[in-house]
Amino acid sequence: MTNETTTTTETGAETNLSTGRMAGGGVDVKATVAAAAAASPKKTSTDQVALSLNNVGVWYGQHEAVQGVSFDIYQRATTALIGPSGCGKSTLLRCFNRMNDLIPGTRVTGTISVEGVDIMGKDVDAVQLRRHVGMVFQKPNPFPMSIKENIAFGPKRLGLAKSKSQMDDLIEESLRDAALWDEVKDKLDEPGTSLSGGQQQRLCIARVLAVKPDIILMDEPCSALDPIATLKIEDLMRTLAKDYTIVVVTHNMQQAARVSDWTAFLLAGEERTGRLIEYSPTEQLFTTPRDKRTEDYITGRFG
Amino acid sequence: MAAAQPATDEVARRSLSESVRRRRSGAAWEGVVEATIYATGLFTIVLLVGILFLLGQQGLRLFFEMDYPIGKFFTFGNAITDNTTDIEKFRFGILAPLIATMWVTLVTLIIAVPLGLATAVYISELAPPRVRLLIKSAAELLAGVPTVLFGFVGLFLLVPFVRDQFGWGAGGMSGMTAGIVVAFIAVPLIISIADDALQAVPLDFKENAYALGCNKLQAIWFVIIPAAISGITAAVMLGMARAIGETMTVLILAGGNSSIPEAPTESMRTMTATIASGFGNASAYSLLRPALFMTGAVLFLITLFTTVLADLVLDKQRKKFAR
């Protein structure tokens, strides 16, 4: 196992290791962090644990995709999983609502507990788990039905609304919470696919909110969106983090810096097995990384 | 162009004005290929029109040259394939074969559609990979078996059974018997096409459904099947076309009675079987020959109509589920 840890908060340790400038793009991650930190003070206190990973490994058949990951994800905070392509961050995320069950030949070792319950346990029903741990995917993907029906889809299957008015309220509430209501309130019966990409993604978030989850997983939610739509989703993520636990996988380090309170950096070696390198409060990870490899990654030397 | 170009091995750079006005070296060949492809495309249309023309020209002689009454052709409740030139003695109406075809098709669809679609959903969404491969391969092999062999199997396994148990039709041979066997010809086709359609549903639809807390059946029923509905409709339509057009099996198993069948369990003769069995003894100047061509024309129009109808349905579905 590599040097994975949860950290104590170091203060004021602005080490002068690098300029924080990305080799290729010339983007200053540190500046982004500083700006984000100034805008909204980050939580670094250890709140209640929402999700706890202990020595988690994932196997796809004979291939070990993730190995020995242990860390805690805190309630009502946003945790970002970053790392280069193929480092296992999406694979790891998909363990949290047992999406990997759908891929034949996948095996998860170690323990993952959500609010103290071991979700890998034999007595745990993955279908029930997914009501509590919702997921937003990379590509906005409304079902081929109206906006309204898209939101009502989950609640209907789960029997959440007792009456039509209750359902209508739930639809409005979900769309409001996803910052989409004002844009779609007059065209709820139009197809979900008629919306723009960013609106579609917010529709997908609203669809998840409608089933009242505790944790929302987001797998690169902005990678198919333009910068303006991305900013809107990021704003939304910050708002949602007040009420929900959010775990987001992102390729975009600026995004991790802007939206998350905690960041986990994963890296895979030659054998393509992802390991946790560092897990720290976001500000600290981007300003004073403790591991040389984190430093190399955030300064753009690889990945 | 540059006046003084150094004499090197470098590929010369041509100016745009010189280049765009020049004919590309492969242009003629491109034209030939394009024309050939266009011609092959046109060929299907020529064939379609040609078939309709032939059937019409040969068939309409019955009414216009031989003065066989049109009303009698469409309403007479029997289709006796006598090789005769005497209008009074010729007793041939299309109603009986038409109804026979409808019975066989109905029986086929009632059995084949649920069986085929359920199997497709099972192998596409529920079965372990090995089982899926096994069933899919078996279905594809089955789809390639000549239908006359299905006729044999039906004759030796099903016919004695239904004769002894239910006493259907002529010694066990009936529309129902034929329909059951034709269903097993259509099932592999339906499985194969419906499975392809289900497999083509984007994975993220399925994942989204599961991520919202759907169980497997909910995901299949509310998301996967609606998304694959156009392909599923095509599978059903092709199964139907198979049932309408199947000849050998119904010739062997449906019994061959030429009068109007009032129930599927009666002995009957479909349009295809009437043509196949009657054509051998239809001489060039008999009334039978154009009558069989007319039957063929009606058969052709029915299949054309169902195909066009299916296309319209598919088009509507495609628009609804466009992404």
Image (tube, rainbow, N blue to C red):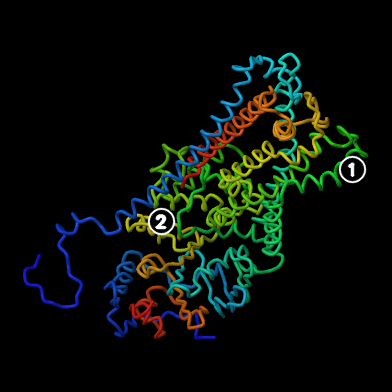
| Label at residue A192 | none
- Which of the pair B96/A220 is nearer the observer? B96
Quadrant assignment, res B105: top right
Percent position of residue A27, x then y: 28, 71
Which amino acid lies under the numbered mark 2 shown in the image of this protein? Leu
- Secondary element under disc 2, as helix, strand or loop, is helix
Residue located 52% across and 70% down the image: A73
Q: CA distance from mark 2 to mark 1?
A: 69 Å
Question: Quick one: label 2, few (<14), some, or many (20+) residues within 10 Å?
Answer: some
**What is the chain letter for disc 2?**
A
Label 1 belongs to which residue?
B161
Tally of numbered tags: 2
Give the residue drawn at x 81%, y 46%.
B152
The quarter holding residue B85 reads: top right
Q: Considering only vertical position in the picture, is A173 above or below A75?
A: above
Q: Are marks 2 and 1 in contact (CB under 8 Å)?
A: no
Given residues B162 and A44, the one toward you in this image is: B162
Q: Position of residue B237 (x, y in %)?
A: 62, 39
Relative to B71, B52 lies left or right = left
Residue type at mark 1: give it: Phe
Image-quadrant location for residue B61: top right
Task: Find residue A236 and name its label.
Answer: 2
